[in-house]
Amino acid sequence: MPPGVERADVVIVGGGIVGASIAYHLAARGVRDVVVLERDELGSGSTTRNAGGVRLQFSTEINVRLSLRSLPRIEHFAEEMGVDPQLRQVGYLFLITEERDVGPFEESLAMWKRLGVPAQRLDAAGVHQLFPQLRVDDVRFATLCMRDGYCDPTSLLNGYVARAREKGARFREHEPAVGITRQGDRVTAVRTAKGEITCGTLVDAAGAWGAEVGKLAGVDLPIRPLRRQIFVTEPVAGLDRDFPLTVEFATSLYFHRESGGVLMGMADPTDSPGFDATVNWDFLPTLVERALYRLPILERANVKTGWAGFYEDTPDKHPIIGAIPGLEGFLCAAGFSGHGIMHAPAAGEAIAELVVDGRTSFDIAPLAYDRFRRGDLIKEHNVI
Ligand SMILES: Cc1cc2nc3c(=O)[nH]c(=O)nc-3n(C[C@H](O)[C@H](O)[C@H](O)COP(=O)(O)OP(=O)(O)OC[C@H]3O[C@@H](n4cnc5c(N)ncnc54)[C@H](O)[C@@H]3O)c2cc1C
């Protein structure tokens, strides 16, 4: 092989939770020659900038099924992977305050029952009993699933990377993919500043940058970066016990316990798609006003830090997992639309199966790239 040209069975572009999970699952299936290219450092994208939420409560069956497949992996991560993901199954509590959201959540409750999701409906009194500090006078009802909760994504990432490395996967930081070589309808190699890596399969796991990587191969992926911000308070006197990750669905405000304080997020409706990850502190008063309304005890707390990251938004809020028709050797695992931590285990399994077996052992047809061409979108309602 000429200098500057290497070979790998699979090259994964993106060293976040999704790329790491894919590398691990490939290595576990016996694919040893795997290279992960990361532009910056492992986890430097959205993987270390999120709320760590893990839930079964989605409005589409495919998202519920991705969660049902992923959650046991996270529940047993410490035994299987040797790293404790600090999963806290304190429940997700969706507060429904608007008439327009009643029907969709009633439908979801019926679907969850059919699929074995242990979610329950609570009235305002039940919510008060569960979480007395919450304001509930405007709550029409709530849904609660105690298998839901939150975890530490960095621990998940570290577990996948460590176990994948042991099995031979190579993670290369500060080495962006800058070009993709095609021969006709086949991807044959990835280019970096260090040279070319020829490969049997290239996987786009570049999260919010997924469309940019797709473009290198001539593929138009409908994935947009959407800034989302998180703010964390100092410890709050009187909030000493665990409480569910609570979502005020109508406004997208959510919060959970974090180091004795409270981690809060809410979508800024004035944000437009783009790669600006600076924190907009001017938005903080809007969020705080809403949080004080819902959880008045926060009056005692100061916000100590905040950060921003990107949702990798697709038009129907579902990821694109699988092949691109007409382009051999290119697989996509991006566009998780704010759910990539909790769905990374299933995504890794699915891509490894596609590489090794040529098909998946579970149905991912609704996540095919082709759905955009067919106009066959299934919209997720429960996006926060
Ligand atoms: C505020 C916020 C809250 C969130 N809350 C949750 C939550 O509660 N639960 C949940 O499941 N998800 C949540 N998410 C979403 C979650 O963080 C993402 O879905 C997940 O991190 C996606 O992982 P990834 O590996 O696909 O992408 P990333 O972690 O972004 O990794 C992609 C990597 O690709 C690299 N890259 C880009 N271009 C190139 C290139 N050309 N060559 C090499 N590498 C490249 C980047 O540097 C990056 O490290 C949240 C996100 C945000 C911003």
Image (tube, rainbow, N blue to C red):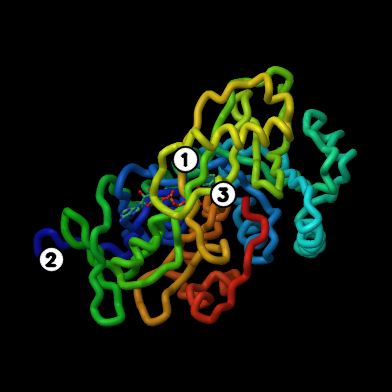
Q: Which mark is on residue 1?
A: 2
Q: Residues within 10 Å of mark 3 (few under 14, many from 20)?
A: few
Name the residue that disc number 1 marks: 308
Q: Amino acid at mark 3?
A: Pro
Quadrant in the rendering for residue 237: top right
SS of the residue at dot 2? Answer: loop
Q: Front-most of 31 and 372?
A: 372
Residue 116 seen in the current view: no
Q: Name the side, left or right, on which 198 lies relative to 293.
A: left
Q: Which mark is residue 67?
A: none
Q: Amino acid at mark 2?
A: Met
Which image quarter is the N terminus in? bottom left
Q: Which amino acid, by three-letter code, is at mark 1?
A: Ala
Mark 1 lies within 8 Å of ligand 1 (Cβ measured):
yes
Residue 89 is drawn in which quadrant? Answer: top right
Judged by depth in the image, the label closer to the viewer, 1 or 2, is 1
- Residue at horizontal 65 percent and vertical 31 percent from the top: 257
Where residue 58 appears, as percent x and y from the top left, is 68, 57
Q: Residue at x 67, y 56 (%)?
A: 382
Decide if residue 175 is on the left or right side of residue 240. left
- Gap between marks 1 and 2 measured at Cα: 44 Å
For marks 3 and 2 on the same chain, the one whose residue lies earlier in the sequence: 2
* Residue found at x 71% / y 30%: 242
Tag 1 near tag 2, CB within 8 Å: no
At a point 29% along the width and 73% down the height, the residue shown is 187
Report helix, strand or loop for mark 1.
strand
Compute the Cα span from label 3 to label 2: 53 Å
Q: Which residue is mark 3?
A: 269
